Image (cartoon, grey):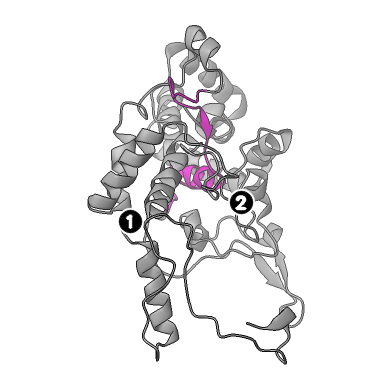
């Protein structure tokens, strides 16, 4: 212990330890007298993942729930303490935590458990009688209508155009050009070629510059990489509409989207149906087909594909 932080005033020796406020777990770490740094890290890892540490298992399942529903069973995923929110469904939170802890402890298994539940598979349709009793949908009487994350929007655009590279692993790709690397580097996103084949990889493999966020993704509510973000904002703004309409990536992928559709089918109406199916995952209704065919006739297939990528149904999950 250094008195007032001064290295010239050393006090009593402090032993490695964990929190003492977690019920059922001692705060002391069992370490030999001649332990190394790796021993301390391993002891802390064992303390965090101890079956008696309910906080760990509750926190994990709460974040997975938040990922799928937009809001966790505890609305403050970074704070399970007295200053945080109370669980809306405490029995469900404990059941998920215990089932995950005592089961395979596989996140893939946990995701599957949540998305195959009756609660997740609800529609987001409004029910006036339920809305009067629970306007915020705390009790999950319907699914929350959610926006796709910025990364998912980018990946979906590449998928609709047929350009999404699904290879796993490997080095990151750069969607910027570095200028003046010899002193203070400038990361110029606007100079990047949207036709670069390396940039067709999933957004999870994007090279992240913490000091200079990517403008297109930031406009779509991507988290600030220089900060810890427990829960992202979901906003709707004119800037987002303009970005999805005019960004160089969207324009390039709209052209490739149109080329892929034209290579697959002939005729205006078949191309409308194929483009709609690729973008939205369903066939258009007769009224939608007629309206989109008119748009194709007036503005061409590329602009039709660009318009489909700008529909709310493309960017929202119902």
Q: Secondary structure at mark 1?
A: loop
| Horizontal and vertical percent position of residue 232 | 59, 44
Q: Nearer the viewer, residue 188 or 139?
A: 139
Residue under the image location 28 percent in, 53 percent down: 106
Above or below for 294 versus 187: above
Q: Left or right: where does residue 131 sit relative to residue 210?
A: left
Q: Check residue 140 for magenta coloring.
A: yes
Q: Position of residue 194 (x, y in %)?
A: 59, 55
Which segment is the magenta one? 137-164
Q: Nearer the viewer, residue 146 or 113?
A: 113
- Residue 271 falls in which quadrant of the image? top left
Whole-percent x, y for residue 92 in the image: 35, 35
Q: Is residue 231 above or below residue 47?
A: above
**Can residue 162 be seen here?**
no
Question: In the image, 186: left or right of 89?
Answer: right
Pointer 1 residue:
52
Whole-percent x, y for residue 18 in the image: 47, 68
Of residue 303 and residue 98, the one placed in the foreground of this image is 98
Q: Residue at x 40, y 65 (%)?
A: 26
Q: Residue at x 24, y 51 (%)?
A: 102
The verdict on residue 279 being magenta is: no
Q: Is residue 113 above or below residue 172?
A: above
Q: Nearer the viewer, residue 176 or 121?
A: 121
Whether residue 317 is visible here, answered yes or no, is yes
Judging by the rendered image, the residue that carries numbered circle 2 is 223
Q: Residues within 10 Å of mark 2 (few under 14, many from 20)?
A: some
Q: Which mark is residue 282?
A: none
State which tag comes first along the sequence, 1 or 2.
1
């Amino acid at each position: 212990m250094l008195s007032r932080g001064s290295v010239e005033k050393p006090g009593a020796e402090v032993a490695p330890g964990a929190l003492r406020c977690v019920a059922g777990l001692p705060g002391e770490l069992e370490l030999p007298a001649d332990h190394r740094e790796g021993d301390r890290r391993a002891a802390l890892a064992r303390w965090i993942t101890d079956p008696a540490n309910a906080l760990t298992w509750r926190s994990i399942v709460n974040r997975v729930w938040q990922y799928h529903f937009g809001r966790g069973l505890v609305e403050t995923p970074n704070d399970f303490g007295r200053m945080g929110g109370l669980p809306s469904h405490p029995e469900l939170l404990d059941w998920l935590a215990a089932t995950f802890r005592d089961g395979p402890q596989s996140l893939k298994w946990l995701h599957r458990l949540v998305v195959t539940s009756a609660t997740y598979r609800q529609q987001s349709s409004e029910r006036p009688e339920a809305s009067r009793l629970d306007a915020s949908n705390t009790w999950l009487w319907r699914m929350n209508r959610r926006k796709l994350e910025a990364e998912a929007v980018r990946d979906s655009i590449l998928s609709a155009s047929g350009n999404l590279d699904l290879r796993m692993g490997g080095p990151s790709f750069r969607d910027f050009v570095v200028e003046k690397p010899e002193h203070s580097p400038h990361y110029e996103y606007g100079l990047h070629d949207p036709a670069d084949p390396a940039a067709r990889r999933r957004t999870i493999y994007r090279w992240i510059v913490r000091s200079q966020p990517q403008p297109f993704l930031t406009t779509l509510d991507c988290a600030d990489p220089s900060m810890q973000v427990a829960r992202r904002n979901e906003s709707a703004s004119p800037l987002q509409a303009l970005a999805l309409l005019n960004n160089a990536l969207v324009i390039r992928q709209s052209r490739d989207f149109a080329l892929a559709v034209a290579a697959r089918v002939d005729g205006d109406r078949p191309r409308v149906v194929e483009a709609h199916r690729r973008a939205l995952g369903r066939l258009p209704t007769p009224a939608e087909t007629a309206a989109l065919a008119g748009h194709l006739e007036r503005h061409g297939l590329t602009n039709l594909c660009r318009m489909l990528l700008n529909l709310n149904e493309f960017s929202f999950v119902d």
